[in-house]
Amino acid sequence: HPEYVKSKAPTNREERVTKSLSKTLQLLSEHDTNATFFVVGELAEKYPEMMEKISENRHEIAFQGYYHEPLWKLNAETLRLEIEKFNSFTNKCIGFRAPSFSLNNKTKWAVKVLEDAGYKYDSSIFPTRTPLYGVWRAPTRPYKPSYEDVAKEDENVKLWEFPLLVYPLTGLRIPVAGGFYLRFFPVSLIKRAIRKANKHGFPAVIFLHSWELDPKTPRLKLGPYKSFVTYHNIEEIGKKLKCMLSAFNFVSFRNYMEEEGLLT
């Protein structure tokens, strides 16, 4: 499902999602940590036992598109249909993350679709610029995004946006929240970014993919740049995560919103 991988994945590939999920759940359990799992619909349908394991371990299930297609490949109607299909075999969830963080002002129509479907929050906006995604002017703290401009706030909107963590530095916003950036930057910088966010009174949104914790994740030939982005330092991500789980208290989006009285 990763954006740089899907076109190269062989049809006879080994699917390791349940194995990598078990490793993720074990790690979270060892640190008594509650998390949100953004699940791709076709995997939830194919592996119902995966959904059961997540729920049994008291984690939140949220939605990440049915086939992990970026919003720029969809429209309002196809997203509605994906949500309906996901809801048909899961308990209705309240959170969404756009595949490849593809919510921006070209796909802002998704905000109203999510709100109409009863979602309470989204976490798709990287408030910076990257080669694949990003909304540079967006707030770096939780806010309610406008239907007209997702970088602006509108208190009349019901949907909350939880932007991904960045580290402000001399006019720059360095993405550190997860994926390649979590693997690339030193854990000391990531910890400073978390502390800075917390100091200003808002949560730091961190993510990783279960396949990044799987030592047997297949290495596909993607070319120098895409291979570097996809696999660089993958063997160290488990150590980094353990370090952060030991240093900070993490919770699911649902639990955070309940504690802060944001669920209405």
Image (cartoon, rainbow, N blue to C red):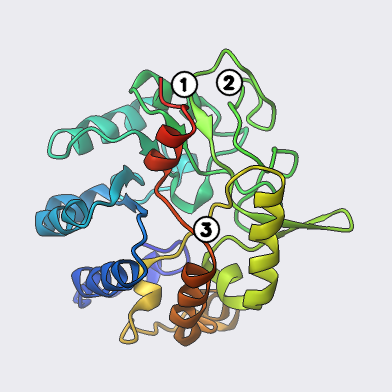
Q: Quadrant of the C terminus?
A: top left
Q: Pointer 1: what residue?
A: 112
- Which amino acid lies under the numbered mark 2 shown in the image of this protein? Tyr
Q: Pointer 3: what residue?
A: 206
State the residue lying farthest toward the right. 170
Label 3 vs label 2: CA separation?
A: 25 Å
x and y, in percent, of residue 140 in the image: 68, 43
Q: Are marks 2 and 1 in contact (CB under 8 Å)?
A: yes
Label 2 vs label 1: CA separation?
A: 7 Å
In the rendered structure, which disc, 2 or 1, sits on the residue that comes first in sequence?
Answer: 1
Q: Is residue 185 visible?
A: no
Q: Give left or right: position of 203 versus 254.
A: right
The tag on residue 93 is none
Residue in view at x 49 percent, y 33 percent: 260
x and y, in percent, of residue 25 in the image: 27, 67
Vertical comparison of 120 with 202: above or below = above
- Which amino acid lies under the numbered mark 1 shown in the image of this protein? Lys
Q: Quadrant of the N terminus?
A: bottom left
Vertical comparison of 216 with 252: above or below = below
The tag on residue 147 is 2
For label 3, the crowd category at 10 Å Cα-Cα, with few meaning under 14, some 14 to 19 and many 20 or more, is some
Residue 149 is drawn in which quadrant? Answer: top right
Q: Nearer the viewer, mark 3 or mark 1?
A: 3
x and y, in percent, of residue 247 in the image: 54, 69
In the rendered structure, which disc, 3 or 1, sits on the residue that comes first in sequence?
Answer: 1
